[in-house]
Image (cartoon, coloured by chain):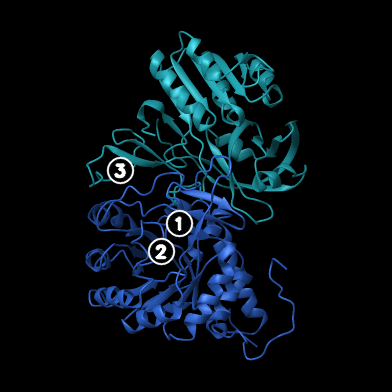
Chain colours: A cyan, B blue
């Protein structure tokens, strides 16, 4: 993964659209021309709560087009609830774009994108970029139940092959989305975003089938900008993303803690030691 | 009538600060992490993340959990150790346009002495905060700040090693914080940081696992503000050195409570995670507050909480 210096800043945006894609799944469209112009696939923003009453929320940048950047999220608590009830015309300040996104270099030809649940929020931009670069992209998309499989058509329209999986069998394959990955063939790159158990399974399957995988990790952030060391993951010291820390004296470990918000959120699966 | 702008400048030991606002240790990196999002010309100083004698990997994850009106953290003093830090990190602070205060943590008096002496010797470092109150490193971290004799010993030892400003960060997890504060001043502290986080715990009732990898953590944010204001008030009654008040400050009115309770300066930590523009907003509004009351400097309100008689007013805090 290459580290990038992006022109991050605080953007004062206006909500220009709000859609409830499913109960508790909301898409906010923001008028944010500079954010939309600078966002790279896999980057995120910290959304500052309009009330000022809770910590900022890390949200993947779903789409970035012309003046519009959009955020797709599940309502899971107080902070996302506040964002979910925003109206068109209201102001939302966001800090970003932040983090190191997906590495799409090396001209991958056949890419599998694995998304679980709200992980779909971070994979449209890479899918679009890969399709523009004439790669063949398959979206393997899993959720608990059919109604939570939002935006699948959007990916099909963008040119992805789409395969669905649900835990309860209400749509697509009845089982885990990683089962679909296990059966897939001929991919030369895997990108994944979703809950940690899914990402661990993707890492295992990727290893089995011998395909490199990039995982966009999920973790609770405090600052989101690398200042607090609250969101770390152990990675090998030889990783290009390893912070330049000295060898841990106790045991001379070859593992270091990297910040998910700063060195990530996207890491090569074979470099993680989690 | 005040003719000039009210002054927000304060003196903490030998440290002259243009603004009475510090960025709390461990919350703000070195400041560079926030430079694109905040105006660092409008802060007093950044207190750096604590450094120890040996490198530390820090605690297992999760290290953070958001809680009602705050958050629990248990980072575990992840840091590269003082030798590497002096060679690779400290030089980066040479030309920063804001002041940085080093933070020293340890597990023995020797540890504190070793790190404090080396860090304080560097020109890049404007002063030293002794973090004797980290709640998240096994059982030893808070030993010093929970014991008046140990507090005195570590402060006196470090005092003999440097003339730079020594700020001693105290723990709220004690029976009598004033007694500890008194010892710290007697041992030579230039200032006191009041308070570190309040110990806490959260449990996931679905999995029955603690929500933090370290099981317990330190609570910060507005949840602890009244605890912190009281601690400042109690400490201010027994010491004459400046107090840096901290604990859940999010707004100018929150900061004012600390000044009125007896703090000379305030520190902002968790609020930077809500909005990185909060510190600059607070200094602008503090100036406005002083201007509106014809006060020439922030020093005029320090410790002026009128506790001489009880008021029948309703408490007008955010929580109503």
Q: Residue at x 40, y 27 (%)?
A: A269
Give the Cα distance between marks 1 and 2: 8 Å
Residue A79 x, y percent position in the rendering? 65, 47
Check disc 1 and report the residue beneath it: B28
Q: Are marks 3 and 2 on the same chain?
A: no
Quadrant in the picture for the N terminus of chain A: top left
Outermost residue, top side: A185
**What chain does badge 2 belong to?**
B
Circle 1 packing at 10 Å, graded few (<14), some (14-19), many (20+), is: many
Q: Residue at x 39, y 19 (%)?
A: A207
Check disc 3 and report the residue beneath it: A244
**In the shown orientation, is residue B290 left or right of residue B216?**
right
Q: CB under 8 Å between callouts 1 and 3?
A: no
Give the Cα distance between marks 3 and 2: 22 Å
Give the Cα distance between marks 1 and 3: 19 Å
Residue A169 x, y percent position in the rendering? 66, 17
Residue B50 x, y percent position in the rendering? 35, 59
Q: CB under 8 Å between callouts 1 and 2?
A: yes
Q: Are marks 1 and 3 on the same chain?
A: no
**What chain does badge 1 belong to?**
B
Check disc 2 and report the residue beneath it: B47
Quadrant hosting residue A264: top left
Residue B114 x, y percent position in the rendering? 22, 65
Where disc 3 sits, the SS reads loop
């Amino acid at each position: 993964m290459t580290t990038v210096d992006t022109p991050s800043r605080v953007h004062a945006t206006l909500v220009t659209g709000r859609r409830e894609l499913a109960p508790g799944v909301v898409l906010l469209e923001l008028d944010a021309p500079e954010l939309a112009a600078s966002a790279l696939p896999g980057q995120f923003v910290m959304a500052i709560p309009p009330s000022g009453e809770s910590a900022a929320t890390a949200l993947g940048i779903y789409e970035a087009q012309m003046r519009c950047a959009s955020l797709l999220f599940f309502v899971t608590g107080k902070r996302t609830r506040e964002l979910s009830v925003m109206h068109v015309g209201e102001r939302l300040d966001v800090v970003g774009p932040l983090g190191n996104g997906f590495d799409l270099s090396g001209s991958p030809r056949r890419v599998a994108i694995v998304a679980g649940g709200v992980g779909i929020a971070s994979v449209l931009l890479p899918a679009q970029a890969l399709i523009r670069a004439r790669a063949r992209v398959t979206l393997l998309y899993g959720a608990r139940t059919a109604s939570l499989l939002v935006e699948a058509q959007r990916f099909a329209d963008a040119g992805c092959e789409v395969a669905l999986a649900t835990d309860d069998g209400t749509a697509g394959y009845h089982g885990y989305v990683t089962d679909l990955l296990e059966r897939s063939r001929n991919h030369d790159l895997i990108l994944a975003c979703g809950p940690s158990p899914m990402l661990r399974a993707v890492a295992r399957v990727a290893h089995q089938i011998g395909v490199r995988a990039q995982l966009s990790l999920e973790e609770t952030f405090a600052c989101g900008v690398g200042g607090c060391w609250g969101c770390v993951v152990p990675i090998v010291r030889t990783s290009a993303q390893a912070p330049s820390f000295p060898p841990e004296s106790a045991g001379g470990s070859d593992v270091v803690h990297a910040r998910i918000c700063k060195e990530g959120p996207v890491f090569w699966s074979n470099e993680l030691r989690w | 009538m005040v003719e000039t702008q009210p002054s927000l400048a304060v003196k903490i030991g030998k440290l002259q600060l243009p603004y009475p606002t510090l960025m709390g240790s461990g919350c703000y990196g070195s400041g560079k992490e926030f430079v694109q999002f905040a105006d660092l010309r409008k802060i007093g100083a950044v207190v750096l993340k604590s450094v120890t004698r040996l490198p530390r990997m820090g605690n297992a994850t999760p290290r953070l959990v958001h809680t009602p009106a705050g958050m629990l953290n248990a980072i575990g003093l992840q840091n590269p150790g003082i030798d590497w830090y002096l060679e690779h990190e400290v030089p980066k602070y040479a030309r920063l346009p804001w002041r940085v205060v080093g933070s020293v943590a340890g597990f023995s008096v020797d540890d504190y002495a070793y790190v404090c002496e080396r860090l304080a010797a560097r020109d890049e470092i404007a002063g030293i905060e002794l973090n004797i109150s980290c709640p998240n490193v096994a059982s030893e971290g808070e030993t010093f700040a929970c014991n008046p004799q140990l507090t005195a010993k570590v402060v006196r030892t470090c005092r003999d090693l440097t003339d730079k400003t020594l700020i001693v960060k105290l723990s709220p997890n004690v029976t009598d914080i004033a007694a500890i504060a008194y010892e710290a001043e007697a041992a030579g502290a230039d200032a006191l940081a009041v308070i570190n986080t309040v110990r806490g715990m959260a449990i996931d009732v679905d999995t029955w696992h603690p929500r933090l990898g370290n099981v317990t953590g330190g609570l910060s944010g507005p949840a602890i503000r009244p605890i912190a204001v009281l601690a400042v008030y109690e400490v201010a009654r027994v010491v004459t050195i400046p107090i840096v008040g901290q604990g859940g400050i999010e707004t100018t009115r929150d900061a004012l409570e600390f000044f009125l309770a007896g703090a000379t300066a305030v520190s902002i930590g968790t609020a930077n995670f809500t909005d990185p523009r909060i510190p600059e907003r607070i200094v602008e509004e503090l100036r406005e507050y002083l201007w509106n009351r014809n006060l020439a400097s922030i020093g005029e309100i320090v410790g002026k909480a009128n506790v001489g008689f009880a008021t029948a007013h309703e408490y007008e805090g955010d929580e109503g």
